[in-house]
Image: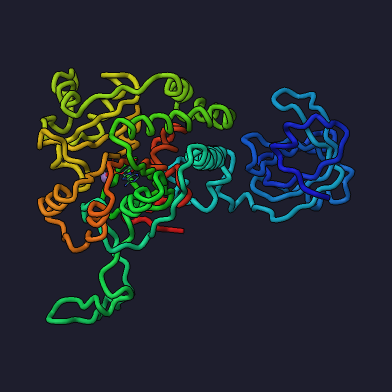
Amino acid sequence: MKRTLIKHVLASTEYGSTVMVAGWVRTRRDSKGGFSFLEINDGSAFSGLQIIVPGELDNYESDVLRLTIGSAVAVEGELVESPGAGQSVEVHAARVRAFGFADPEEYPLQKKRISFEKLRELAHLRARTNTFGAVARVRNALAYATHKFYQERDFLYLHTPMITSSDAEGAGEMFQVTTLDLAAPPRLDGEVDYSEDFFGKPTYLTVSGQLGAETYALALDRVYTFGPTFRAENSNTRRHLAEFWMIEPEVAFADLADNADLAEDYVRYLFRYILDRCSDDLEFFNKWVDDGLLARLASITDTDFERITYTEAVEVLEKADAEFEYPVNWGADLQSEHERYLTEVAYGKPLIVTDYPADIKAFYMRRNDDGKTVAAMDVLVPSVGEIVGGSQREERHDVLLDSIRAKGLPEEHYWWYLDLRRFGSVPHSGFGLGFGRLVQFATGMQNIRDVIPFPRTPNSAEF
Ligand code: ATP
Ligand code: MN
């Protein structure tokens, strides 16, 4: 018989029909009347399915009474409208097949709550908990909605390389990729001889797909990437990972205002999508993780984002009646505490901050006429802070070359990027949205390590 996912069984009204389901046991209660209740979950829905197992089954004692939390089981039986509160249907088992058991003395995920910190050490099992199942479903819905959003708007999905020889952010926070023997690398005049390395030169894991996306936007008009990026920054914060996924749209003939419109439309589209499709999971997060979550998501879908310049943001922060750990002054980068004050306290809604000082932003951002700022934008949201970073790109060859030199970057690495400004250059813009931060915002989960299956952070790459 063909198996049905529990989410479809829960939505079915075909009472009296026979169904087959399979999953992992969440609870087992044995009744005095000689039968048992099982709740099983297969991850397809937040809720599990209640199964009633009669004691008359051949393997009732040998198997059913050994099913404890975490055991795997398949059940065939009749779909029945449930008399009990809390579920609409249940299954009266005619056959139960036990797969792997889970010794309750050994299996770590028993009834009592385990901290998220502890669960990180059990990353191979944590997907079986309510929280991590819900995170996985919301993450999946946001990924699907991302493709849907861009495909509906005629963007081309682009795969940019993970191994690169150029530093897209110019920040030097890259992991090196090499096949050289680290204990005894080949040397030439005392220096490591990279001509003997796999690619014949030093290479790294990419920090962004943007530069590659620009080459395609300048031919195919609008593209987006959605892939992993890597940063060897030693930020042990609750919103940084060493490996994280980023979505990077890039659009030709688009200026900074167009870029901000796109980011706002996209973010609002995502939250509307999950409010419509993931209500059980979001209600769970609202109840157990962050009681302001649903209100915050709903308010984002129907409020326009505020748009202010960096200079205005600094003025607001200087006047703020708040104690900041880091001082605020024009020219300094906004810290997470400043970003959160602006979006949570000062404006009470998502914020797009534009026109940052050139000195704190990447070389490729378009220089403004004031000579001090660039056409950058960050989208800030409550609780998480920066979720999107983007800009209008410098399309003028000589200005770009000047910025590369001013930042002390090796201009010979960027010859192809400069070429784009020599042939058919046009104004163009794009941004990067950190997928982990998005999932954090969408679920209310405090730590980015708990919204990706296997987090990579300094000193941690287990599994
Ligand atoms: P931050 O100042 O928060 O470190 P950034 O300015 O370095 O961010 P960008 O280079 O603009 O970030 O990257 C684009 C987006 O990628 C950010 O808005 C953020 O959502 C996400 N992001 C950046 N670094 C990380 C990281 N280490 N882990 C997870 N997400 C990140
Ligand atoms: Mn960073």
Question: Which residue shows up at 21% across the image and 78% down it?
Answer: 193
Give the percent coordinates (x, y) of residue 136. Answer: 53, 42
Question: Would residue 141 be visible to someone looking at this image?
Answer: yes
Instruction: Name which quarter of the figure residue 12 lies in.
Output: top right
Give the percent coordinates (x, y) of residue 112. Answer: 55, 38
* Figure check: 192 above or below 455: below
* Figure check: 201 above or below 116: below
Question: Which residue shows up at 81% across the image and 27% down it?
Answer: 81
Question: Which residue shows up at 10% across the image and 37% down it?
Answer: 371
Give the percent coordinates (x, y) of residue 351. Answer: 31, 26
Foreground pick, 261 / 24: 261
Question: Would residue 291 be visible to someone looking at this image?
Answer: no
Give the percent coordinates (x, y) of residue 58. Answer: 88, 50
Question: Which residue shows up at 68% across the image and 36% down it?
Answer: 48
The reply, left or right, for residue 463 in relation to residue 426 is right
Foreground pick, 409 / 48: 409
User: Ligand 1 is in which quadrant of the figure?
Assistant: top left
The reply, left or right, for residue 57 in relation to residue 203 is right
Instruction: Name which quarter of the figure residue 83 lies in.
Output: top right
